[in-house]
Image: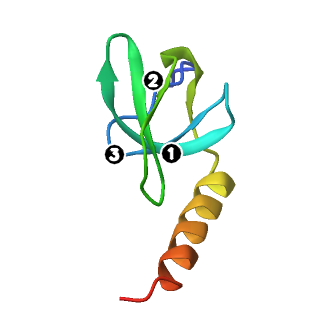
């Protein structure tokens, strides 16, 4: 049975905060807000649950590629 309802991305999944346009990893939910972190790490931000949406295949590929390219520039 197909459903037209979209489910919000789960913890650890890439998602888009439609209010800010930022893409990040869903870290959890606290106080009615979704905690998101930038793909390459950094400070978390709060997003409204209704504004957190799954990425299109193109957006996800682009975000993962950008993270991989950024990590390759870091000297270990």
- Residue positioned 53% across, 84% down in the render: 73
Q: Is residue 58 above or below residue 53?
A: below
Q: Does residue 62 appear to the left or right of 70 in the view shown?
A: right
Mark number for residue 1? 2
Residue 17 quadrant: top right
For this orientation, the residue located farthest to the top is: 32
Quadrant (top left, top right, bottom left, bottom right) of the N terminus: top left
- Lower position in the chain sequence, tag 3 or tag 1: 3
Mark 3 touching mark 1, by CB under 8 A?
no
Dot 3: element: loop
- Lower position in the chain sequence, tag 2 or tag 3: 2
Q: Does residue 34 appear to the left or right of 2 in the view shown?
A: left
Q: Return the residue at label 3.
A: 12
Q: Return the residue at label 1.
A: 24
Q: How many marks?
A: 3
Q: Which of the two discs, 3 and 1, sits closer to the camera?
A: 1
- Residue positioned 58% across, 70% down in the render: 65
Dot 2: element: loop
């Amino acid at each position: 049975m197909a459903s037209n309802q979209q489910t919000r991305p789960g913890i650890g999944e890439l998602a888009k905060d439609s209010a800010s346009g930022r893409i990040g990893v869903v870290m959890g939910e606290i106080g009615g807000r979704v905690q998101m972190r930038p793909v390459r790490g950094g400070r978390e931000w709060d997003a409204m649950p209704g504004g957190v949406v799954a990425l299109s295949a193109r957006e996800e590929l682009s975000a993962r590629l950008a993270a991989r390219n950024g990590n390759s520039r870091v000297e270990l």
